[in-house]
Image (cartoon, grey):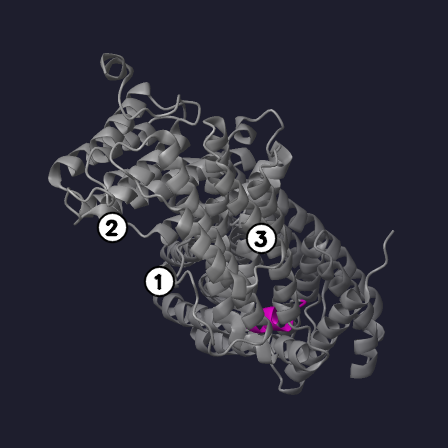
Amino acid sequence: MTLPSWRAWLFAAKTCAAALLALGLALWIDLPRPYWAMATVYITAQALAGATRAKAAYRVGGTLIGVAAAVVLVPNLVAAPELLTLALALWTAGCLYLSLLDRTPRSYLFMLGGYTAALIGFPAVTDPAAIFDTAVARAEEITLGILCAALVSSLVLPQSVAPVVAGRIAAWLAEAGRWTGEVLSGAAEDPEVRAQRLRLAADAGEIDLLAAHLAYDTSAQAAAAPWVRTLRGRMLMLLPVLSSLDDRIRALRAVSGLTPDLRDLLRAVEAWSKAGAPREEEPVLQARIAAAERGLPPDPDWACLLRASLLDRLRELVALSRDCRTLEEHVARGGGPLRETLAFGGEFAARAPLHRDHGMALRSALGVVVAISLCTALWIATAWPDGATAAMMAAVLCCLFATKDDPTPSILGFAQWSAVAAVAAGVLLFGVLPRVHDGVTLALVLAPPLLLCGLLMANPTTAAAGTALGVNGNALLAIQDRYNAEFSTFVNSSMALIAGIWIAALVTQLTRSVGAEQGAWRLLAANRRDLARAAERRGRGDRVAFASLMLDRIGLLVPRLAAAPAESALRRGDTLTELRVGMNLVVLRRARHALPAPLVARLDGVLDGVARHYRRPQGTADPALVADIDAALRLIGAEPGPQDESGPRDRPEGRRDALLGLAGLRRGLCPDAPPYEPRPAGLREAA
């Protein structure tokens, strides 16, 4: 058995101290339910100071929103319990829906705004005239707990987010550097290594989350948070670039197109990458890449197209690698104005889009409505004195675990540990606390179980158990300024609490639980829908925004792939291939704006064929689609290129982008197809 680390003990001690401080202040200012302040500490506490402060800020905002909703709804609808139940359920469901669509730390604000209204509204049904005073008291108790957690975390040996962010970035870039070396050297890639590469997308998402917490950090490096997000965009772009580069190298090798000058160039870029991508050598490498460029003459053959595409990917790799190292150093210095110009700049102005699953968000919202309705129906039908507790817990549990594919096991685990908390609270409440007569003794009695909860929370594998014990244990203790516990009331409250959690688990299982494999297929289906839309739209696409969305989905897909059975078809696919297809679709959408009408019509025919392919179930591309791509390559390739002095020179970039986009599309959709021929076999024989 591994003993807790000193960091775990420090977190447990700080959380215990914050809880006791919140309890003492709540008793001192005579708040009606001081135990709410204690329980709130265990909801808010995080190991890192920035994460605690971020969660505290959003929790305060969400609490105030929920309080306002309860004050508006309860007095106006208390005479109609069915309408009040429906109103509180719809409010909670609507806030949860917005929370699940947001997918940033700000989502906590929406979630809190939802279930705080239920926490305040349902207990106030028996005394609606006092709803304003009750709401103010709950807001004060919750805010006090939040502030105590944030204060202790920030002042007592604060654990900064900055070193964690720096370590994650360094580890990510080191792994990307190893992948770069393997790609440029032509090393074989087995499925396990490919899965490890996909993990980079998930790790980049975690870095983005840490950057949001870094903005609330107590260290001087909090100003570097925007630059971490800038760095993350370039880190993500490395993935499709490296995947494309690997594909082009293999394709050129297959047609004997990897000439000695290209091999020397690949070795030079590999050596530069292993040396840490020094900035002073980047212009020299870019000059070598430009010197290797031969242009695209009329009727370019397959090797020519692959060579040009390879050089483009090398150019992007060098620029992105240089930017990543520059930004890594800038973040380490604490941010501020950037003294250097980034090589890969203009495409990263907007915030990267995130995947939103409206279907699962709606199903989660439906689960909240059904769970709350069942609890309140049971409450009304049986005149259960503590029915409000069941409705509250159903609302909270449906919200807390809604981000999981299958929340039911987590909710049931929470119920199990809540039952343990009820037993432990009963022992303390009726066996120990009657002998306590002053604040110091009370603190000494509470410190050991509070420390235990903190130690459990510090370990990721037992964090849920620690949270259940810390939150529900304190709530069931219900410590007041004087001892007034009754066994029947305690048992009733405990049963209502656990019943509400079980009802949440039952409803969740029926309305929205899906397995990891089904969740993965939903993500892949969303990718295919977006690829079809990208092919159908005719406007200028945002290449980086599209890549960010696809890579965000890959980050969500990675843990689901790991949980899928070994024989699952999910493990046989290459999700980076679809990403490359999408990037080429965006390039083609841009290229069509710089081509004459006949070429645009041919290009649109290819795009329509790609859209039809992705509207159908997964499968290999139709041979007719390959023929359409080849026909478009021949038609556009026959146009005079920039090296043809006799032809028009007004559209060379559109022609080049179209040809390379079509070549990339062909490799992504049909990697096993025979090499493209500028002229069909029949015409070659006639010639």
Q: Amino acid at mark 3?
A: Asp
Give the percent coordinates (x, y) of residue 312. 40, 47
Q: Is residue 51 magenta?
A: yes
* Name of the residue lying farthest toward the left: 597
In the rendered image, the vertical position of residue 98 relative to residue 687, given as above or below = below
Residue carrying label 2: 540
Give the percent coordinates (x, y) of residue 146. 59, 75
Frontmost of labels 3 and 2 is 2
Residue carrying label 3: 203
Q: Earlier in the sequence, mark 1 or mark 3?
A: 3
Residue stretch in magenta: 47-53
The secondary element bearing badge 1 is classed as helix
Q: Earlier in the sequence, mark 3 or mark 2?
A: 3
Q: Amino acid at mark 2?
A: Arg
Distance between the alpha carbons at the discs numbered 1 and 2: 15 Å
Asked if the residue at tag 3 contacts the one at tag 1, i.e. Cβ–Cβ closer than 8 Å, the answer is no
